[in-house]
Amino acid sequence: MENDLPPELPKMNEISEETQTSFQEMPEIWDNSKRARDVKVVFWVYIGISVVSICATIFEYILLKRINDGVIVDEKLATASDTIQLIVGLVNTGVLIVTIVLFINWFRRAYGNLHRMEVRDLQQEEHMALWVWFIPIISLFKPVMIMNEIWKETQLKLKSLKSSYVFQSGTLIIGFWWALFVFSNFIGNYVTRTVWNAETVDELMHSSQVYIMSDLIRIPEALLVILIVHRLSKIELELAESYEDAGGTIVYK
């Protein structure tokens, strides 16, 4: 009776065991959806603070122009304007720090998941998704290169798991975002020097104008960040679903 067993049965069992083992060996990836939500929320808050900052600076500019024209300005009004500027500036700085921390956390996890899924030919180590933002010269081009990698490789991985997926181009919005980011940082540095060195009314008026321009540039920059994170988050969620269907594990932390 033993000799009558079909030879195919042991082979099918071996294939089944190999398939189960390959599923078990799929590396786990970490959920990034909560970090994406946090980034979008804090950037909306940042946009709101920027609008308030623009209004406060315009008010200050009007007062300075009146003084420059020889109009007597109520001292209490001038003091109130200075106080508002100080408070808005402190809040703006605090929110900016939070946006930086949350964005880099999301950015690093998105890149880290590509490493965890053992995507080949990634240009940087995972930890460089953090440090490229702070290294002089490198910070001018490496972050956008990694962002393009995240956009491309996340979709390629999804495509390998879900053949019906249609690839989305992100070159335009990522390019616009990075151009605004570099320009706004250049303007920001100029604003800092101008504000600290301003002594006369004319210089204060000029610094107010530049400050308004800086805030105006940061608003579309922030909107592009929200758009990029939103679209990438949807891709990551679709990848997570396909990854789980293929036997992978998503860790929520």
Image: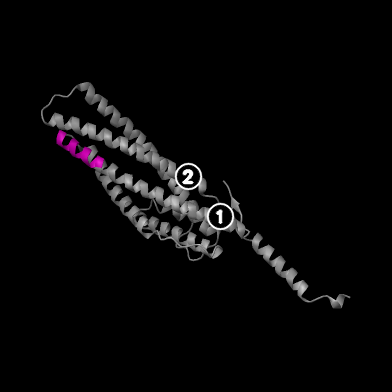
In the rendered image, which residue does mark 1 sit on?
Answer: 240
Q: Is residue 203 magenta?
A: yes
- Measuring from the top left, give residue 106's x and y in whole percent: 47, 49
Q: Whole-Å distance between the Cαs marked 1 and 2?
A: 16 Å
**Picture layout, residue 236 above or below residue 206:** below
The region drawn magenta spans 200-212
- Measuring from the top left, give residue 226's x and y in whole percent: 40, 47
User: Along the polypeptide, which appears first: circle 1 or circle 2?
Assistant: 2
Identify residue type, mark 2: Arg
- Between 64 and 33, the one lying in front of the other is 33
Residue at image location 25% in from the left, 28% down from the top: 81
Q: Does residue 128 appear anywhere in the picture?
A: yes
Q: Main secondary structure of the magenta part?
A: helix
Which label sits on residue 4?
none
Residue at image location 23% in from the left, 38% down from the top: 195
Graded by Cα atoms within 10 Å as few (under 14), some (14 to 19) or many (20 or more), the crowding at tag 1 reads many
- Between 198 and 105, the one lying in front of the other is 105
21 on left or right of 176: right
Question: Quarter-wise, where is residue 150 in the image?
Answer: bottom left
Q: Does residue 200 appear anywhere in the picture?
A: no
Residue at image location 44% in from the left, 58% down from the top: 151
In the rendered image, which residue does mark 2 sit on?
Answer: 37
Q: Say what secondary structure mark 2 lies in.
A: helix
Q: In this view, which residue lies farthest toward the left?
A: 70
The reply to whether discs 1 and 2 touch (Cβ–Cβ < 8 Å) is no
